[in-house]
Amino acid sequence: MSVVAALAREHRVFLRMIDRIERALSRVEEEGRADARVDLLVLLTALERHEEIEAEAFADPPDPSDAATAQAAAELRREHAEVGVLRDEVRGMLEESSGSWEHFSSRARELAARLRRHFETEEQDIWPRYAHAAGRSRARALARRVDARVKRLERELALEREDAADYMDGRR
């Protein structure tokens, strides 16, 4: 497995979460809002792990003096600055206890769309350029580490979702 394949697997974890949020938004308000809030709470933790995993994957650029590598790394930093903004928006949505269902749904759908664009930009634009510059050096060991982190992320998020559901049930 390549590093890019392991990172794409991590993105699929997120895309499943986004799908769950979007399904929740199609339900009646009480049930949909509760389910979406649980998934948003888990998403908050997951986004932090996303940045950690990618920071590890791209921590040691193959040739920092190479213009293409430097540009890809700069674009990756910009993308992750946007992820920080998205995390703040998720926090705001979770702190907001009132507000119309339409407003909440609209914000959640926009958040989902922005996350999808983020993952698409990384997968289709940034990672291929970075991987091309990296070549095959240290790729296998790094791919194994990233894959192990993604597997751990999946397990952690499953437990986090259970905890979040229990926590949110207590708040209803």
Image (cartoon, grey):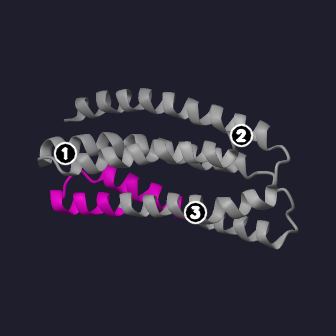
Q: Work out whether mark 2 precedes mark 3 in sequence or the reverse, and give the earlier one.
A: 3
Is 82 placed left or right of 110 in the picture? right
Residue at image mark 3: 124
* Residue 154 x, y percent position in the rendering: 50, 32
Proximity of marks 2 and 1: CB atoms separated by less than 8 Å: no
Q: Secondary structure at mark 2?
A: helix
Residue pictured at 30% horizontal, 60% vertical: 109
Q: Are marks 1 and 3 in contact (CB under 8 Å)?
A: no
Q: Please tell me which residue lies in front, 27 or 6.
A: 6
Q: Which residues are magenta?
A: 82-110
Along the horizontal axis of the image, is 152 left or right of 3?
Answer: left
Which residue is rendered at x = 36% and y = 56% of the image?
A: 92
Q: Disc number at residue 32?
A: 1
Q: Amino acid at mark 2?
A: Ala
The quadrant in which the N terminus is found is: top right
Which numbered circle lies on residue 80?
none
Q: Which residue is mark 2?
A: 143
Crowding around mark 3 (Cα neighbors within 10 Å: few <14, some 14 to 19, many 20+) is few
The amino acid type found where label 1 is placed reads Gly
- Magenta segment includes 38: no
Is residue 15 among what the camera can see? yes
Q: Amino acid at mark 3?
A: Gln
Q: For the residues marked 2 and 3, what is the alpha-carbon distance in whole angstroms?
A: 18 Å
Q: Earlier in the sequence, mark 1 or mark 3?
A: 1
**Which element carries disc 1, helix, strand or loop?**
helix
Residue 12 falls left or right of residue 69: left
